[in-house]
Amino acid sequence: MSAVVLFVLFFVILLFGLPISVTIGISSILPWVVDNTFAANLVMVLRQMMSGVNSLTLLAIPMFMLSGTIMARGGISKKLFDVFTYFVGNVIGGVPCAVIITCLFYGAISGSAPATVAAVGAMTIPVMVNLGYSKEFSTAVVTVAGGLGCIIPPSIPFVLYSTSAGTSVGDMFIAGIVPGLLLGGLLMIYAVYYSARRGEDRVRIKAVMGELRGQGFLRLFLDSFWALLTPVIILGSIYGGIATPTEAAVISVYYALFVSVFIYKTIKVSEIPAVFMESLKTIAPILFVLSAAVSFGRVLALMNVPQMVGAWITSSFSSKWTILLVVNIFLLFVGMVMDAAPAILILTPILAPVMTAIGVDLVHFGIMMVVNLAVGFVTPPVGINLFVASSMTKIPVIRIAKVSLPFTILFAIGLVLIVIFPQISLCLIR
């Protein structure tokens, strides 16, 4: 079976509506079904799936997801939002900007875009609606800003990319800081413009700000101190050389439990099993996707797909910038139809050698890839952030995508800047 036929069948199966994990699993055994002399038989595929998740690095993913679930149930996002609103809530567009900043901080806690949308959106969308913002705009802000959760470290997609490309997880985390801040700043620019053009209910906002300011900064800071300390502990332990990313993920779980149960007392001890079960329902399907994607990647390697794609790209396009343009357009398309995790695990071994051949730093390429796929979080037909937001607000996915379009365009502009100026990604590690 040729690689072209395999990928055509892959997308045909995907169009039938089967889960992505099942689609990848079926595609992994198709070459052996067609030719039973092919090395990757059913037993080998199953072994690859089992060994694919038997990785200390990948263990960080379920740990960060569990930590994010605990913090969402523990009300960490609400305390973060209150602090940021205290400082910027009085200016034009201050409330949506506070939401975007909250997404930045929560992304540094959960490492997951959908988790950021769920945790921040459940709390901030009703607040914004009560302050006079339209429900669609409020949902759009959280939906797009939630994509920052996979760019601001610690990032689950960065862990996956590092595993596939052989780069340092720590370098990827550091490299994601400036691009994440850049994208957050671009989103805030449009939030201010929108608020200034459409107008705000200043009476309601001033009333809420009056209540918030009435608490006094010291009281508000002390109440939110443990929430603000969370990313400091997680990232500080990594960058300080105290813990590996996986160890930091485990630390974040214990810290989240301690703060939520004993300090904020927002989670009872009797509720902990339910929180773990809630997290397990999210983690299990993702681990199935990861295991299937690792197996599929091995099958593609046996079929020499990375070498063939690399040879085709370098022979068809001579200019470095042309190759980058083609690859980025391809990644944007992939992000529209496939979740980030399998896309990273399948495409990184194929595209990384091409990037090395044209002189692109693999850390820089990792940032490009994740930002491209982050755009896919808010673009149909897959757009997982859209579905998470729609399930919370009951607004149709297409409607959210339409209102989110200006934010998405700014996200894409940020991507262009990141591609053109590698130092945006590399300035903190070079």
Image: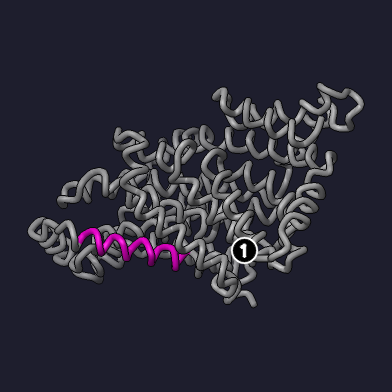
Instruction: Give the residue drawn at x 60%, y 44%.
Output: 341
Residue 212 sits in which quadrant?
bottom left
Q: Quadrant of the C terminus?
A: bottom right
Question: Front-most of 132 and 350?
Answer: 350
Residue 246 sits in which quadrant?
bottom right
Q: Amino acid at mark 1?
A: Met
- For disc 1, the neighbor class at 10 Å (few under 14, some 14 to 19, many from 20) is many
Question: Front-most of 228 and 15?
Answer: 15
What percent of the width, then of the height, locates residue 408? 40, 53
State whether the magenta stretch is mostly helix, strand or loop. Answer: helix
Question: Front-most of 355 and 139?
Answer: 355
> Is residue 227 inside the magenta stretch?
no
In this rendering, does residue 72 appear at all?
Answer: no
Q: Which residues are magenta?
A: 180-195
Report helix, strand or loop for mark 1. helix
Instruction: Give the residue drawn at x 36%, y 65%.
Output: 225
Q: Residue furthest left?
A: 203
Q: Is residue 367 left or right of residue 49?
A: left
Question: Front-most of 70 and 346?
Answer: 346
